[in-house]
Image: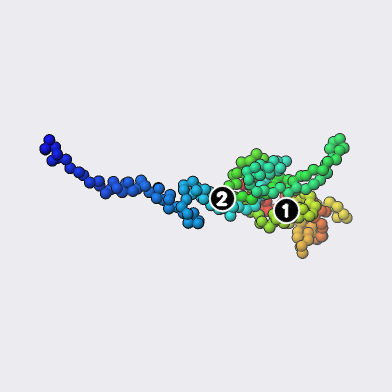
């Protein structure tokens, strides 16, 4: 018995063990010392909430208006689905009167730009819109979607409330058009812009001469595609 007592000794805890113990408490210390914007300690759940709010603010700062291309006659459905996903969007409409086969007339609202509507979104989150049934693509190029100016959307929204709009064939400078009314009806040429107005350049191929005549946009219609550099890609 005496020999056993002599063999008994107390071994001090290595300093490395105490370091491991302190390491195990590190998350508690970090969590307690994470402060809010008012200097108050935040629990873990509040930190996650703060991070989420910061993420939302970051996405909002990167959001811009874009044109979303849809399948024909799917504009209103996509518009409603975007609203359900809390994505800001804008679908310009115009009023017109349709006559049914039975002769009955009814006033309806149709998209001003068939096949298109506008949405405000962070381009990194565009898959949220493109995954919707009826959505085709966001207008842009291979380098990314093309943003629209906020002022353009604001101007269109305000003018829709005070002016009467209706769809019109898109006319691009350099596009081949036909004059459809007036004494020059059925003549064809290329559209140019000068001094804020539109002109059609009429060419006489035989003598390689041309003349320009001023026209109203309602008096011409496109008969050829827009120049390639004016045609956007779709993402």
The answer to whether one can see residue 103 in this image is yes
Location of residue 137 (image quadrant): top right
x and y percentages locating residue 174 in the rendered image: 73, 56
Residue nearest the observer in this picture, 55 or 215:
55
x and y percentages locating residue 188 in the rendered image: 80, 53
Location of residue 82 (image quadrant): top right
x and y percentages locating residue 146 in the rendered image: 63, 53
Q: Which residue is mark 2?
A: 56
Q: Residues within 10 Å of mark 1 (few under 14, many from 20)?
A: some
Q: Secondary structure at mark 2?
A: helix
Q: CA distance from mark 2 to mark 1?
A: 26 Å
How many numbered circles does the render carry?
Answer: 2
Q: Secondary structure at mark 1?
A: helix
Residue appearing at x 50%, y 56% in the figure: 37
Residue nearest the observer in this picture, 46 or 117:
46
Residue nearest the observer in this picture, 219 or 86:
86
Residue appearing at x 85%, y 36% in the figure: 101
Judged by depth in the image, the label closer to the viewer, 2 or 1, is 2
Residue appearing at x 70%, y 55% in the figure: 154
Q: Which residue is mark 1?
A: 157
């Amino acid at each position: 018995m005496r020999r056993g007592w002599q063999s008994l000794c107390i071994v001090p805890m290595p300093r490395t063990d105490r370091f491991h113990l302190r390491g195990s408490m590190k998350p508690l210390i970090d969590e307690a010392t994470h402060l809010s914007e008012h200097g108050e300690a935040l629990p873990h759940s509040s930190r996650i909430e703060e991070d989420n709010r910061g993420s939302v603010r970051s996405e909002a700062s990167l959001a811009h208006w874009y044109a979303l291309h849809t399948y024909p006659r799917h504009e209103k459905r996509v518009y409603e689905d975007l609203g359900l996903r809390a994505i800001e969007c804008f679908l310009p409409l115009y009023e017109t009167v349709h006559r049914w086969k039975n002769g009955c007339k009814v006033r309806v609202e149709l998209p001003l730009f068939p096949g298109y509507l506008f949405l405000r979104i962070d381009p990194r989150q565009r898959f949220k819109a493109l995954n919707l049934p009826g959505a085709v693509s966001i207008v842009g190029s291979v380098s990314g979607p093309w943003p629209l100016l906020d002022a353009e959307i604001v101007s269109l929204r305000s003018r829709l409330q005070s002016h009467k709009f209706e769809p019109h064939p898109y006319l691009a400078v350099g596009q081949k058009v036909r004059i459809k009314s007036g004494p020059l009806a059925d003549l064809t040429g290329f559209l140019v812009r000068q001094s804020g107005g539109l002109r059609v350049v009429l060419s006489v191929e035989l003598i390689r001469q041309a003349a320009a005549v001023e026209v109203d946009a309602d008096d011409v219609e496109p008969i050829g595609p827009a120049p390639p550099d004016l045609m956007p890609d779709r993402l």
